[in-house]
Image: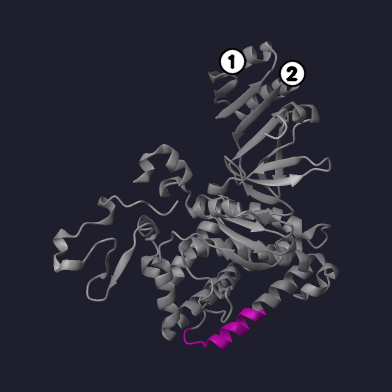
Amino acid sequence: MSADNPRTALARPTLAMLPRVSDNLSFLYADIVRIVQTDTGVCAETETDSGHIQRVYLPTASLGCLLLGPGTSITQPALATFLRHGTTVVTSGSGGILHYGAWQPSEKSTFWLQHQVAAYADEARRLEVARAMYEMRFEETPPAGVPVGQLRRLEGNRMQKLYRNLSTKYKLQPFRRNYDPGAWDRQNPINKAYGAANAALYGVVHTVIAHLGCSPALGFVHHGKQHSFVYDVADLYKAETTVPLAFSLHASDFPERDARYRLRTHYRLYRLIPRMVRDIQYLLAPEDAEEEDEAEGQWRVVELWDPDGGGSVGGGVNYGGGDAARAVPASELDVPEGGH
Amino acid sequence: MVVITTTAVPAHVRGALSRWMVEPSTGVYVGTMSARVRDELWAAVSASVGDGAAVCLCPADNEQGFDVRTAGERRREVVDWEGMMLVQMNPLASAEVEMERQVPEGW
C-alpha cells in the first residue's frame, strides 16, 4: 500500500483518517472568495482594499459539504483535494438559497445505492418506502391500506395546520409560502429564512446521500427531478427544523444569514446528520440498517457481479484459465493505487 | 484540557503559566483545570502579553468542539464564517512585503 509512505498518506488520506459523516462539520458557505490550492493546503483568498491577499485556510478533510455561493471561483487542484477528502461540493445561489448541483467523490461503495435502486424499481417496495416516509413525518402510523393520494392530502393539511399554529404563536398574518425567485427581495423574512434554511438543509441531505453513495435522483415520494430523493429526505425534517426556525425569524433584519447561523446549532442540537444516515438506511433496507461499517470497509475494493453465487465475487482477480486457486488478488500484486 | 501558546510574551507571564501547566515545547503550555481557573488564568495572561501574543484553546460545546481565544496582534486572526471558526491570514504590513520582494530584477 502507498500508505506505507507517511508523506503519501498525508497527501492521499487513508479511510481511517477521514471522519465518518456523523463526525463531520456539517457545512461551510463561501461567498465572494477565490478557493485555491496552495503548496500546503486549500485556502479561500480575498483581496483587501489595499490590494493585498487575505487567506483563510479551509479544513477540507473534516468538512462534510462546501456550499459555493456566487462570486466564488475554485481551481481544479482545490476541487480535486475536496473530492479526494470525501467532501461534497455544492454550487448554490445567493445566500445559499438555490441548489444547482454537486460534485461527489468517486471512492464510494454502492451498497446503499443497490438497495435504493432495488426498492425504487419494484413498485410494491417503492410504495412501502413512500408510506414509511409519510409515517416518519406523521410520527404515527396511518391506517393500513390508505392510498398514497390520501396520505398526501393528510400531509398537506398537517403542514397548513403547522403554518397556522406558528402564525398564531407569533401573532402574524396568515402565512403564504412564496417560491417566486423573481420577487425574492420583496418577500417577508419568513419566506426568506425558510428558503435559506431549506437550501442549507438540502445541502446537508445531499451530503448524507452522497456519503452513503445513493442517487439523489431516485425519489420515492418526489419524482422526475435530479434531486427527488434529496427533497424526500429533507421533507422528513422540515416540520421540526426549518419551518419553526423560519417563523422565529419573522422580525429578523438578516433572515437568511440568521437562518443558516441558527441551523448550525440545530444540526448539533438534534444530531440531525447521524439521524439522517440512520433514517435513510432504515427506509432503504430496514434489515441491513446496521451494516454501514461493513459496507464502508469495502470502499476501495471493486467486486464483480455473480448471479450464481452470493451476489458478488472479489474483483482485481484474473479468472482466466479456470483455476481459481491460482488467481492472485490485486492486493498482493504491485498495483499502483490510482493515477497521480 | 487547556492549551495556551505564547509568542514573545514577558518572562514573568511564562513563569506564571509554568506554575499551572507543563511546557512540552517552547511557549506551548498544556494542563487540565476547571473552567473557572482557566478563565481567571486567561484573563491575567491576556492582560499582560505586552507586544507579544497568546492563544488559548479549550473544549467548548459548539459544532467544532473547541474554542479559540486570542490576545495580542498577529497576522493570524480568528474569523467566524456563519458559526464556523476559521483562521484568516492577514496580509503582511507594507514594510514586510518590501522585504519579501527583495528578489533580483528579472529572476
Residue type of the residue flagged with mark 2: Ser
Q: Position of residue A3 (x, y in %)?
A: 38, 43
| Residue at (47, 52) in percent of width and height | A20
Indicate the amino acid at tag 1: Ser
**Part of the protein shown in magenta:** A144-157
- Residue at 43 percent of width and 54 percent of height: A339
The mark found on residue A325 in the picture is none
**On the rendered structure, is A229 left or right of B78?**
left
Q: Are marks 2 and 1 on the same chain?
A: yes
Earlier along the polypeptide chain: callout 2 or callout 1? Answer: 1
Quarter location, residue A319: bottom left
- Quadrant of residue A107 in the image? bottom left
Tell me the element at label 1. Answer: helix
Residue B69 as seen in the image, left or right of residue A125: right
Residue A310 location, x and y as percent?
24, 70
Q: Residues within 10 Å of mark 1 (few under 14, many from 20)?
A: some
Nearest the viewer among A11 and B58 is A11
Position of residue B19 measured from the top left corner of the image (x, y, whole percent): 59, 14
- Letter of the chain that mark 1 sits on in the rendering: B
Q: Residue furthest front?
A: B106
Name the one closer to the observer, A22 or A265.
Answer: A22
Q: Which residue is mark 2?
A: B48
Q: Report the Cα–Cα distance between label 2 and label 1.
A: 15 Å
| Residue corresponding to mark 1 | B18
